[in-house]
Every structure is written in structure tokens, then in C-alpha cells.
Amino acid sequence: QLKYMAKHNSLGKRGEELAREYLASKGYAICEENWHSGKYELDIVAQDGMELVIVEVKTRSKTDYGNPEDFVTPQKIKRTVDAANHYLELQPHHLDIRFDIISVVLDDVNSDNYELEHIIDAFMPDLRTR
């Protein structure tokens, strides 16, 4: 029995794939993709030089209601920071932490026609002291 993913789920997966390929092409080392632990979730964790980069990927098929990065709400930022804190408890290290957003707009999941924007230092959270 086949299960079909909702269109937005497969679109999101394609956006994350494009974001990973983009980061790798820029020399980032991908540490984690779709990291989950309990209620915590991070799209991409990568290393850029001496920084650990937590990347929130937002994918949309249209920008009629705003750009994808506009959907990173204060609640989403809080959940991402909470997840990052949890990740750092499980994977301690001494790198600086940075939060980026990658927004991807693509026509459909099979399209090679897309726009990708990388917003470095998209938000500055209060991380727990380590």
C-alpha cells in the first residue's frame, strides 16, 4: 500500500534538498539534516568555519502571501532556539552558533526552476550559557 505525501510536505523536502546542495556548494559541512529529538526539530545543522549554523528552511510555491522567510514567526524562532539548546546539550562543542534562514520558492516539486535566498544571521536568540 502506497502512502502519498501531501504536496506541501514533498515541496518542503525538495526545498531542504536544494538548501543542503547550496550550503555544500558554499563549503559548509552538513552535520545533520532533519534532526529530531523528542519534540525538538532542526532542518539543517552545518559547520561554516568556526561557526555551527542552525538553518531554518522555508519553502513556498508562490509568494502571493509573502516571502518564505516571512513565515519564520517569533514562535518558530523560539522553537528553533529551544531545539538548538537541546541539540547543544546532546552534542556539546565550542563553536560559535549562528542562525540562518534559507528561503526557497519553486514552481513545483519536480521543477529545476527555483529562487533561493540565504539570510545569514537571520536572528540572534538568547542561547543558554554553555
Image (cartoon, helix red, strand yellow):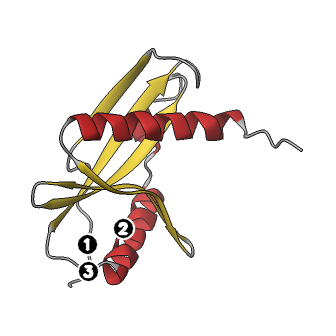
Q: Earlier in the sequence, mark 3 or mark 1?
A: 3
Query: Relative to 68, is 130 on the left or the right?
Result: left
Q: Earlier in the sequence, mark 1 or mark 2?
A: 2
* Crowding at mark 3 (Cα within 10 Å: few <14, some 14-19, many 20+): few
Name which residue lies at 27% across and 40% down: 23
Which tag is nearer the camera, tag 3 or tag 1?
3
Label ID, residue 6: none
Q: CA distance from mark 1 to mark 2?
A: 8 Å
Give the labeled residue for mark 2: 81
Name which residue lies at 19% across and 37% down: 26
Give the labeled residue for mark 1: 126
- Point out the image quarter for the C terminus: bottom left
Q: Amino acid at mark 3?
A: Pro
Q: Amino acid at mark 1?
A: Asp
- Determine if residue 102 is in view: yes
Which tag is nearer the camera, tag 3 or tag 2?
3
Q: Position of residue 115 (x, y in %)?
A: 38, 22
Give the labeled residue for mark 3: 92
Q: Judging from the image, what secondary structure is the residue with disc 3 in?
A: loop
State which quadrant residue 53 falls in.
bottom left
State which quadrant residue 31 falls in.
bottom left
Front residue of 75 and 85:
85
